[in-house]
Every structure is written in structure tokens, then in C-alpha cells.
Amino acid sequence: MTISKTIVLWGREDLLSSSVELFLTSQKGWKVISISNEENFEALILAVDKVQPDVVIIQQGDHSSNSYPLMKLIQNHPGLRVITVSLNNNLMEVYSKQDVLVKSASDLISMVETAPANASQH
């Protein structure tokens, strides 16, 4: 069974963005909404508020130096996964919010020790 996904893709209007959009839309049940990074971050936030996507993919560029908007997206949309893609180093950064009720100090230790699957360590 295929799980449907709604994805907002925010990036330059270039060959990479077009290729990523084509690749993602080839997945059965996936809907991709492209937004040019010529729009400011508030336009992205408004689109996310309206569409309520499962994933936001951001092509890193001029806007990548400010992490506050990313945190705002994650705080305002629990369950949202934000993926940034860099052409400079071929790395993706994946952000998602996880709430953990702290019952004891060991809960903090447990979260620090737990590494996400497939995460690289630098």
C-alpha cells in the first residue's frame, strides 16, 4: 500500500528543483507544491499553514544562514519534517520535532545517547 504525501518544495527555479519535483511526483500518491525562493520565508510559512504538508524541502542558498524560520516551521507544525538540500556538499539535513516528557534526569541522557538511524556523525 502506498502512503500519500504532500510535499512543499522551496528553492530556485532551476534544473535541480525541476528534477527533484519530477522525481518526487513520480511516486504514486505524492503531491508536490513548488514555491520559488524568490518569495520570502513568510510566503513559505503561509503556504505550509494552508497546505499542511508532510514534508518541506528547502534548497539551501541565501536563506540557509538563518535557522529561526526552520525552527518556527517545526514548532508550529508538529509532525512536519523539514529537509534542507545543499548543492555545495551533497548533504541533506533533516529536522523534525520530537516531544519527550521528562520524568527524570535519565530521560535527558537517553535522548542524548539515542542517535537517529542512518545519521552520519561528524
Image (spheres, rainbow, N blue to C red):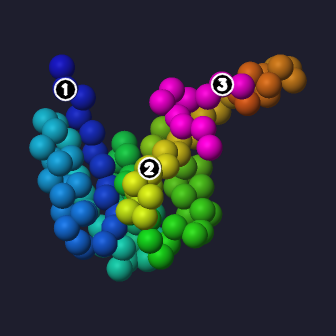
Q: Which mark is residue 114?
A: 3
Q: Residue furthest right?
A: 105
- Extent of the magenta region: 113-122
Q: Mark 2: few, some, or many residues within 10 Å (few <14, many ≥20)? A: some
Q: Do the residues labelled 1 and 3 touch (CB within 8 Å)?
A: no
Residue 6 x %, y %: 28, 45
Q: Residue at x 36, y 73 (%)?
A: 37
Q: Residue at x 59, y 49 (%)?
A: 75
Against 86, residue 110 (above or below) is above
Against 44, residue 91 (above or below) is above
Pointer 3 or 2: first along the chain: 2
Pointer 1 or 2: first along the chain: 1
Please identify the quarter of the rendering in which residue 114 is found: top right
Q: Nearer the viewer, mark 1 or mark 3?
A: 3
- Badge 2 marks a residue whose secondary structure is strand
Quadrant containing the C terminus in the rendered view: top right
- Badge 1 marks a residue whose secondary structure is loop
The one of 71 and 111 positioned closer to us in this rendering: 111
Quadrant containing the N terminus in the rendered view: top left
Q: Which residue is drawn at 71% across and 25% down?
A: 113
Q: Separation of disc 3 and disc 2 at Cα?
A: 20 Å
Q: Mark 2 points at which residue?
A: 92
The amino acid type found where label 3 is placed reads: Thr
Q: Separation of disc 1 and disc 3 at Cα?
A: 29 Å
Residue 94 x %, y %: 49, 45
Q: Does the magenta stretch include residue 118?
A: yes
